[in-house]
Amino acid sequence: MTRFIHTLALTAALVAPGLTQAETLRAQSPARALLGQVTGVIGTPALAAGRFQEPGAVLTGDWSPARIRVDEIGMVHVGGSDSAVQIDPDGGMTFTVGCNRYAAQASTRAGNRLTIEAIRGTLMACPPDEARLEHRLIDALHAVRRYEIDDTLLILQDWHGGTLLELRAVPIRVPGLFPPRAPWADPHPELDHPHGPWHRG
């Protein structure tokens, strides 16, 4: 299966005149990129009232999982899987490791707080290795409460700042990887699992 290759999409507000999006990303320090998000997206009156905001430019884009935390082992590389994560400006999120397709909703708040909710997806039987990676990815996304940006890495963390998942922006987008609104990305009772099919016990 062809490995999914993606692009990081930045809004025009974060792209310097005369530079490509990739050049702008490389030129910006993590602090500068986050400042652009805070002043342009998160720093709004609605935030003062405690309402969740859209993820904004820094999180919006196409990512490839790089490392994931496995209990009692630590961080392990995800390399070799056809995996992809896409985050839309409105917080809509789609992801796959090459078998099932999943959708979710990402929301941010001040202080780099992030939650990922309403995870749902297709129910195909997958090869054991892909199934295990799916379960680990979904468990990690459920536990996400914070994020950090480190160059081209999006680091998803738990409440205590421990790293759960690292996503890497990659440079080329493959058109049509995910339709603009795939039928399975909308809520369906038969696909919604409050604890997910990965829940045990």
Image (cartoon, rainbow, N blue to C red):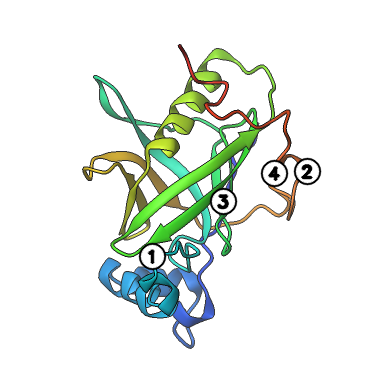
Residue 12 vs 56, above or below: the answer is: below
Q: Dots 4 and 2: beta carbons under 8 Å?
A: yes
How far apart are labels 2 and 1 at the CA level?
Answer: 32 Å
Q: Dots 2 and 1: beta carbons under 8 Å?
A: no
List the single residue furthest toward the front.
49
Would you call the spot at circle 3 few (<14 residues within 10 Å), some (14-19), or many (20 or more)? many
The x, y position of residue 184, in whole percent, is 73, 39
Residue 183: mark = 2
Query: Which mark is first along the chain, 1 or 4?
Result: 1
The x, y position of residue 137, in whole percent, is 46, 32
Q: Kindly report which numbered mark, 2 or 1, lies closer to the viewer in this rendering.
A: 1
Q: Kindly report which numbered mark, 4 or 3, lies closer to the viewer in this rendering.
A: 4
How far apart are labels 4 and 2 at the CA level?
Answer: 5 Å
In the displayed structure image, the side of residue 127 where residue 34 appears, left or right: left
The x, y position of residue 31, in whole percent, is 26, 70
Q: For the residue marked with disc 2, what is the amino acid?
A: Pro
Quarter of the image that includes the N terminus: top right
The x, y position of residue 9, in whole percent, is 54, 65
Would you call the spot at circle 1 few (<14 residues within 10 Å), some (14-19), or many (20 or more)? few
Q: Nearer the viewer, residue 66 or 32?
A: 32
Residue designated by label 3: 86
Residue designated by label 1: 50
Residue designated by label 4: 185
How far apart are labels 4 and 3 at the CA level?
Answer: 12 Å
Question: Quick one: SS at disc 1?
Answer: loop
How far apart are labels 1 and 3 at the CA level?
Answer: 26 Å
How far apart are labels 4 and 1 at the CA level?
Answer: 27 Å
Q: Kindly report which numbered mark, 1 or 3, lies closer to the viewer in this rendering.
A: 1
Q: Dots 4 and 3: beta carbons under 8 Å?
A: no
Question: Quick one: SS at disc 2?
Answer: helix
